Image (spheres, rainbow, N blue to C red):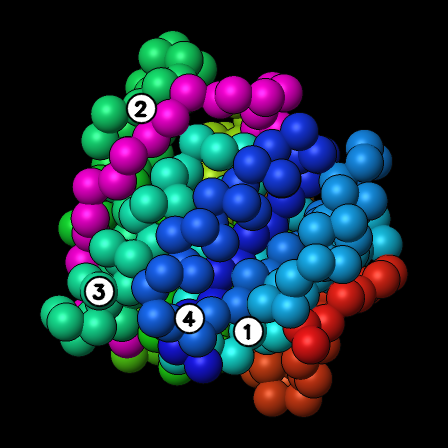
Amino acid sequence: MDLSVVIPLYNESESIDELNTSINNILNNSGLDYELIYVDDGSVDSSWEKIKDICKNQNKLSAYRFLKNYGKSMALSAGFKKSKGEIVITMDADLQDDPNEILALYKMINEDDKHIVSGWKKKRYDSIIFKNIPSKLFNWAARKASGIKLNDFNCGIKAYKSSVIKQIELTDGMHRYIPVLAKNAGFNRISEKIVQHHPRKYGKTKYGADRFIKGFLDLLTLSFVQRFGKRPMHFFGLFGTIILLVGFIFSIYLGIDKLFINTSGRLITERPEFFISLAAMIIGLQFFLAGFLGEIILRTRKRKDNYIIKEEIKRS
């Protein structure tokens, strides 16, 4: 199969028909063997009923409905695992992403031999205060932390080689950083394409200002995992060893001072150095054990899906 289009959605019943018609009108005349994959992230409106109605008249469509709302990362993860296309394109279901960009992204990722082509909403139709400015700050921080020169990490419309999305593991909130995860896995041919962005036509956004706070926290997590995820002992063990060493130095000093210098002085437990030594050894040991346990968990964990599919409609 040439192309899979993965569309995560949550309470987008008003836009599904229009979006589906637009995508099929574009792809039916493209000569590509394609599939559409809708992942309903636990919608509480009539989104799933709309999808079921669409499926009755189409054989290029698969759909999966989550038991509850797990988040966009899990919806994309499910879509990636079910996709069969050599190229996988993601887009949001709110009609702010333009379906006309699909063929341009498909052509660009093939002709330029890229692993990822990310959309860039250079001209946005969102709130300047609550979306545009926080988005610019977030993207600046992501560029600095990752070294990837993208202007819009969080753009919903992107194109991926199948080999990329089949190798990376998405956890909650990490859909923003798929290019970073891909780069860490060795897929470093990443480029960007300016895409058309439209004002929201139906409903309201599902994301508040808190998503940028969560995004920055996720970026810190990703930066740590990027450096020490495969060898947690290198971080925790190093700090633990340094702090333990400080504790031992203080304890040796106290012992020498008590035995040979200040033999008739006050009790060791009355001296502040004693508590510094004790606290340092306890904290250092905890750091060391955290690294040791991290190594054990890393080597024994089994990968599993963090979502439950309640219903599914498979492509015939």
Amino acid type of the residue that numbered disc 1 sits on in the rendered structure = Ser
Disc marking residue 124: 2
What's the magenta region?
Answer: 187-208
**Residue wearing tag 1:** 83
Residue type at mark 4?
Leu
10 Å neighbourhood of mark 4: few (<14), some, or many (≥20)?
many
Q: Earlier in the sequence, mark 4 or mark 2?
A: 4
The answer for how far apart the CA atoms under marks 3 and 1 are is 19 Å
Q: Earlier in the sequence, mark 4 or mark 3?
A: 4
Q: Residues within 10 Å of mark 2 (few under 14, many from 20)?
A: some
- Give the secondary structure at mark 4: strand
Q: Is residue 35 left or right of residue 41?
A: left
In the displayed structure, 41 sits above or below 302; it is: above
Q: CA distance from mark 1 to mark 2?
A: 29 Å
- Element assignment for label 2: loop
Residue sitting at x 21%, y 72%: 110
Question: With respect to residue 233, does 25 lie above or below?
Answer: above
The residue shown at (59%, 21%) is 202
Query: Do the numbered discs 1 and 2 sit on residues whose CB atoms are within 8 Å?
Result: no
